[in-house]
Image (cartoon, rainbow, N blue to C red):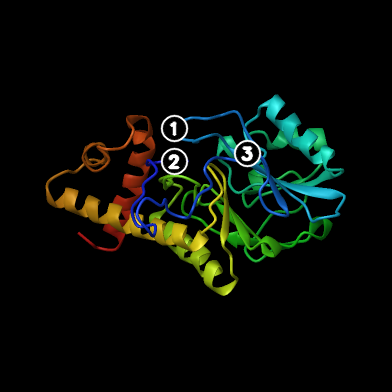
Amino acid sequence: MNDAPALRAGAGSAGEEPGAPEPRVREGAVTERAACVLAPNPSPMTLDGTNTWILAEPGATTAVVVDPGPEHEGHLRRVIDAVERSGRRVALTLLTHGHPDHADGAARFAELTRSPVRALDPRLRLGDEGLAAGDVITTGGLDMRVVPTPGHTSDSLSFQLVADAAVLTGDTVLGRGTTMVAHPDGRLGDYLDSLRRLRSLTVDDGVHTVLPGHGPVLRDAQSALDYYLVHRASRLAQIETALENGYRTPAEIVAHVYADVNRAVWPAAELSVRAQLDYVQERGLM
């Protein structure tokens, strides 16, 4: 979920946006193994809407769906239609995390497709198997690795799509703007560790494409992650300065630090501020 507008600073040459985003959210195939179906739930928090991802190995008869999205019957059936038009059936559903715009449709989707739902949170699972760090998913020959990325929420996961040098990031990295740390469940220290973990994939495994939960695909994963890390450090410094200048409550700090941000996302910004205040206090930075 978004907590800031798209910014252009720190991306490379002048005028470039961080991570080299595509011009818009593009439905259909975006890599050899990944296709997007956009949910009809746009808002300041969800950007264009939730990206539901269909993943399949070329030539396979089965597909994996990541984040069915909200409980919207038309959207869920569009996802199934897209899978069936490719000559496949849904064999497995995965969740990046449990926020409603990603997971509320999972139970109905499982009913429609008779596919299990795997998630980190046991309350979201439908079937015998969950997900854990280091798991390798090989449904239909597809090679996906589970990457723990807590911070936005405690149950946030990313999925590395190995053969496409891509990573599905849910709300951990968005295609436009930055994401919130959903205090108290989300924690800033965890989130920073997760960003560093994802960045290491760009160095160690050659990951270059981000398939986000909202917004357009990013074609320069390393640049996007560098930007996110710089952005978080900058926000933290702004909050420390606000505290030094006498701002005390999260609402006061949001009004001061996020004055240039759409007020519709101030409630989300306040959650991030609370997480950052916890981080400052835990580390004795003030």
Q: Which of marks 1 and 2 is nearer the N terminus?
A: 2
Q: Is 80 above or below relative to 151?
A: above
Measured as percent of width and height from the top left, residue 75 is found at 69, 29
Label 3 to label 1, Cα distance in Å? 19 Å
Report helix, strand or loop for mark 1.
loop
Q: In which quarter of the image is residue 25?
A: top right
- Counting from the top left corner in percent of width and height, residue 197 is at 50, 66
Quote the CA–CA distance across marks 1 and 2.
Answer: 7 Å
Q: Disc 3 residue type?
A: Ala
Quarter of the picture containing the C terminus is: bottom left
- Give the residue pinned by disc 1: 44
What numbered label is drawn on residue 106? none
- At label 2, the amino acid type is Asn
Q: Is mark 2 on a helix, strand or loop?
A: loop
Q: Which residue is drawn at 78% across and 45% down?
A: 116
Looking at the picture, tell me which residue is in the foreground, 91 or 18. 18
Residue placed under numbered mark 3 in the picture: 103
Q: Which of 204 and 116 is in front in this view?
A: 204
Above or below — where is 6 with respect to 19? above
Which residue is label 2 attached to? 2
The reply to whether residue 183 is in sight is yes
Of circles 3 and 1, the one toward us is: 1
Cβ atoms at labels 1 and 2 below 8 Å apart: yes
